[in-house]
Image (tube, rainbow, N blue to C red):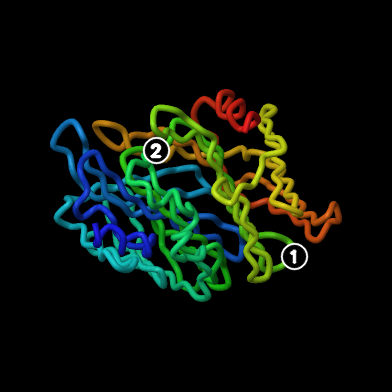
Amino acid sequence: MIKWFKGLQHPEAFHGADSRSPYFEGWYHKLVSKTKRSIVIIPGMYRSGEEENEFSFIMIFDGNSGEVHFERFSYDHFVSKTNAYDTEIGKNHFSKNKINLDIKSGSFSIKGAVNFSGTTPWPVTLLEPGCMGWYSYLPIMECYHGILSMNHSLSGELSINGENINFNSGLGYIEKDWGRNFPQSWIWVQANHFKKGKVSLSASIAKIPLLGTRFAGFIVGLLINDKLYRFTTYRSAKIVNIKKNSDEIEWVLKQRDLTLSISIIIGKKSGMLYAPDQLDMVEKVEEHLDSSVKFKLQEHQQVIFEDESDYAATEVVGDIESLLELANNI
């Protein structure tokens, strides 16, 4: 119990050393170059709940081509610390400050290193150990979520299938998920390439199972020049309205005197990411890296900041109609 409690203060670290099956854990890195080339890299591990199937993996999603490469490794090749983000998978290394990649598998190859500076993690306190707030203390949650860096600078280079991608002066984002399974349905958007300087948005809403029922839980963080605005379920923020019409999503939230309006247009080119199932990791999450998002932040109905980005990542997964029905009845 003490070990579990200490782990809550380090959402970035590995939580699965003593976990029961089924279990998964993955760290999501989004790298966007100065020329707006987007690459997603996800190291992680998976343990099936129904048969002996345990392995580690590295997933690479190229937003330019839409191609997803999923590389499996023996679980014996997975080494990860429980008090910090420091993970090795084979010859590849991942931390809050840097990633090193060296994979050659059939016709696919990736090699190089990218450094991170100025990382901005979601604050961790005793009352709110990360972006899930007090929900992190509930050991019965199906899936846990952490935001390791809303925004940071990049330097370095990756060679993917012989193409060199320079990430100097680029921007990055890191989050992670761990637990038994992903939610049944969710909407997620993230962007930190906005037009007005140091701005980052991470917004998600999902159908969450809890004690025999389900609710629409949401986590929205808006970073503007080092100030983090938080609109979350556990902080008693309210959904004024959320709706989806074809490839457009409109979402309005209220937190005391603040109102945040988010408009999303889902992109055209997607890749199918792997996610945990009962028996294996399977292709089931469609992600776009070419979506657009704009927001307006108001205080006492006066606009205090608004911005837009054409380089947003989005996921819209599962039975969205029932999710929106839950959300609009909160």
According to the picture, the residue beneath numbered tag 2 turns out to be 182
Query: Could you tell whether 268 is left or right of 80 in the image?
Result: right
Is tag 1's residue or tag 2's residue first in the polypeptide sequence? Answer: 2
> Of the numbered discs in the image, which one, if any, rests on residue 196?
1
* Rendered location of residue 95, percent (x, y): 36, 68
* Rendered location of residue 127, percent (x, y): 47, 61
Q: Residues within 10 Å of mark 1 (few under 14, many from 20)?
A: few
Q: Kindly give the residue lying farthest to the right in the view shown.
A: 302
Quadrant in which the N terminus appears:
bottom left
Front-most of 74 and 185?
185
Q: Residues within 10 Å of mark 2 (few under 14, many from 20)?
A: some
Front-most of 311 and 176?
176
Q: Kindly give the residue lying farthest to the bottom in the view shown.
A: 117
- The mark lying in front, picked from 1 and 2, is 2
Q: Up-down: is 13 above or below 291? A: below
> Of the numbered discs in the image, which one, if any, rests on residue 125?
none
Quadrant in which the C terminus appears:
top right
Name the amino acid, label 2.
Phe
